Image (cartoon, rainbow, N blue to C red):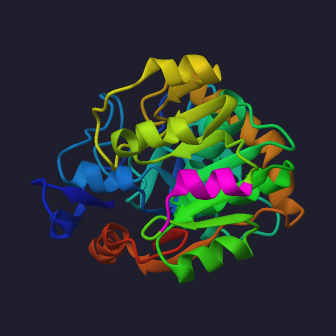
Amino acid sequence: MHAITIEQPGGPEALVWAEVPDPVADEGEVLVEVAASAVNRADVLQRQGLYDPPPDASPYPGLECSGRIVALGPGVSGWAVGDEVCALLSGGGYAQRVAVPAGQLLPVPTGVDLVTAAALPEVVATVWSNVFMVAGLRPGETLLVHGGSSGIGTMAIQLGKAVGAKVAVTAGGKEKLARCAELGADVLIDYREQDFVEELRSATGGAGADVVLDIMGAKYLARNLDALAMNGRLAVIGLQGGVKAELDLRTLLAKRAAITATSLRARPLEEKAAIVAAVREHVWPLIAAGRVRPVVHAAYPIAEAAEAHRILEASTHVGKLLLTL
């Protein structure tokens, strides 16, 4: 088969469509013929040599895909050859075929076409596990989403609104904020021109956010704590603003607040399977009902993966970037 390979870390040109060995479905796995994959920032970090895949994962980038099952490994039940699926991956989505643990498969949801379904697994699993399973966002609470126009952000807005939360977002520029508003965001903050702590306090009567979904890490740590409400929860899922910062524990104590930080890729199989099962139970009905939808900026042939990476790094997109086969 062919896959996007990275012979030497570097810029987008390091992504090379090349012939590679065929994958095999081992115990508990299925083999999926890929229809589409999606671009995530983790793929960019892997391309740059900054984020190696787990030891047992495919060496090729791609943390999610959609496609059709073409083979079942030993011990797999509940799935059949020909089923249309989307999948959460530890790697290997930028390829014609990929082996997937059966617990990380999802049926293509009602109302979504096979290619577009590739935009769902990573963002839905990330948002649901962090905002709901860990941070416990409840109806009537306020959720602050940094990077509201990103793939993660566009999904977080919709899921927050679907459960009855008030959603505030940060994004750069009026156009991106307008797209966030279309998805249901209540409070729109241009991080280039406004202080999100002040804007959030003004919009919540001084209370702040019950849950903050953060992609920035160190750069926003102190301000995120200032933005939290009493008993607030800060969920860190990205480090775009650095990895080291000082933490004033008095703020945490005074607000009885909590900080969690998770990554999805390196979690054990059983944890990923539990997240995927929760997504299927809670989110797939929302998609089928039209209350939540994948947001796709553009799709590119997989051989043009370098161009999709350039757009992601330039942050000119809204939603997800897909790679099609």
Judge left or right: residue 185 versus residue 196.
right
Quadrant position of the C terminus in the picture? bottom left
**In this rendering, is residue 190 above or below 94?**
below
Determine the image quadrant of residue 29: top right
Looking at the image, the residue that sits furthest to the bottom is 175
Percent coordinates x, y for residue 100 in the rendering: 52, 41
Q: In the rendered image, is residue 302 in sight? A: yes
Quadrant position of the N terminus in the picture? bottom left
Q: What is the count of numbered marks?
A: 0
Determine the image quadrant of residue 84: bottom right
Percent coordinates x, y for residue 168 in the rendering: 67, 57
Work out whether residue 267 or residue 57 is closer to the camera in this orientation and state it. 267
Looking at the image, the residue that sits furthest to the right is 289
Determine the image quadrant of residue 101: top right
**Residue in the image at 33% along x and 31% along y:** 54
Percent coordinates x, y for residue 153 in the rendering: 58, 58
Looking at the image, the residue that sits furthest to the left is 8
**Residue in the image at 42% along x and 57% along y:** 40
Magenta stretch mostly in which secondary structure? helix
The question of residue 147 being in magenta is answered with no
Work out whether residue 47 or residue 128 is closer to the camera in this orientation and state it. 128
Q: In the rendered image, is residue 85 in sight? A: no
Work out whether residue 6 or residue 285 is closer to the camera in this orientation and state it. 285
**In this rendering, is residue 139 above or below 303?**
above
Judge left or right: residue 69 versus residue 16.
right
**In this rendering, is residue 158 above or below 53?**
below
**Residue in the image at 47% along x and 31% along y:** 26
**Residue in the image at 54% along x and 61% along y:** 170
Magenta extent:
194-203
